[in-house]
Image (tube, rainbow, N blue to C red):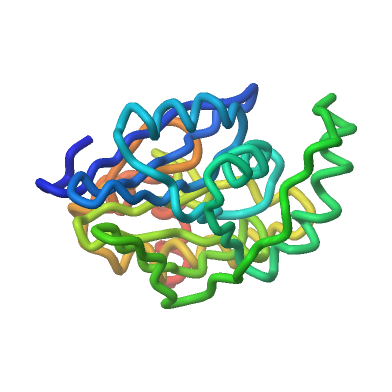
């Protein structure tokens, strides 16, 4: 995807959970940000090489295992700085081991601790790429979305095409997630392209008009 003359965005579906990892790079400077390297770090690195970019930051939307299995490998090979919201730190540290055991993953290469915490309004930026951090808790306590001024929203597992992220895992909160979506994400322009953590892309306008969870929530609040 070429959003502008300078910006390149490409996604790769990784792992058994079919998670969307995104690489956002500058054609002019060759620097990039990777969102949610969920598995298969060698494939993510090959994608970045094909794009002609070097990953400088790893910005995670949250710390569920299907979004972090590739963090260690990508960080080790690139030296990229790993970013996460502090509220997901316990999930990162303790959830990885328990989830790896549960799903049969190798627990010997856990993700590193974040080198910095990201919070509301922070800007994750490399030369030619600028993402604004939006706190969207609900799927996990520290769930984040990232918005590019070119009209792209990387929504993690908060907002999907016709659906929302699960809130029945430990730390999930349905009301909090719906507030995140309706009060923050729906404030973005309708033409904003939504690039989620799973499944196909959508737009803010399409979800405002037809997402059944949003429709029901908005109707209840209007009463």
In which quadrant will I find the C terminus?
bottom left
The foreground one among 207 and 221 is 207
| Lateral position of residue 32 relative to residue 160, left or right | left
When the figure is inspected, residue 100 is found, relative to residue 140, above or below; the finding is: above
The foreground one among 209 and 85 is 85
Q: Position of residue 142 (x, y in %)?
A: 63, 65
Q: Please tell me which residue is depicted at 48% across the width and 76% down the height of the picture.
A: 120
Q: Position of residue 77 (x, y in %)?
A: 57, 40
Q: Position of residue 131 (x, y in %)?
A: 35, 62
Residue 23 image-quadrant placement: top left
The foreground one among 4 and 194 is 4
Q: Please tell me which residue is depicted at 18% across the width and 39% down the height of the picture.
A: 2
Let me know if residue 58 appears in the view: yes
When the figure is inspected, residue 145 is found, relative to residue 8, above or below; the finding is: below
| Residue extending farthest bottom | 121
Q: Please tell me which residue is depicted at 21% across the width and 48% down the height of the picture.
A: 7
Q: Please tell me which residue is depicted at 33% across the width and 51% down the height of the picture.
A: 31
| Lateral position of residue 176 relative to residue 202, left or right | right
Q: Position of residue 124 (x, y in %)?
A: 41, 66
How many marks are shown on the rendered structure? 0
């Amino acid at each position: 995807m070429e959003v502008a003359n300078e910006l390149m965005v490409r996604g790769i579906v990784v792992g058994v959970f079919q998670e969307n990892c995104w690489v956002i790079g500058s054609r002019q400077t060759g620097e990039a940000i990777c969102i949610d390297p969920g598995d298969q770090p060698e494939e993510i690195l090959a994608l970045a090489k094909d794009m002609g970019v070097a990953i400088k930051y790893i910005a995670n939307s949250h710390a569920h295992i299907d979004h972090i299995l590739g963090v260690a490998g990508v960080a080790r090979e690139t030296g990229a700085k790993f970013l996460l919201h502090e509220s997901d730190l316990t999930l990162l540290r303790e959830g990885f081991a328990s989830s790896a055991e549960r799903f049969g993953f190798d627990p010997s290469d856990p993700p590193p601790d974040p080198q910095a915490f990201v919070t509301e309004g922070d800007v994750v930026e490399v030369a030619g790429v600028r993402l604004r951090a939006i706190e969207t808790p609900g799927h996990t306590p520290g769930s984040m979305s990232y918005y590019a001024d070119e009209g792209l929203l990387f929504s993690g597992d908060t907002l999907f095409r016709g659906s929302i992220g699960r809130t029945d895992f430990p730390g999930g909160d349905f009301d909090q997630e719906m507030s995140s979506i309706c009060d923050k994400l729906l404030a973005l322009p309708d033409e904003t392209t939504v690039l989620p953590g799973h499944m196909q892309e959508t737009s803010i306008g399409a979800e405002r008009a037809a997402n059944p969870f949003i429709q029901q929530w908005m109707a209840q609040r209007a009463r």
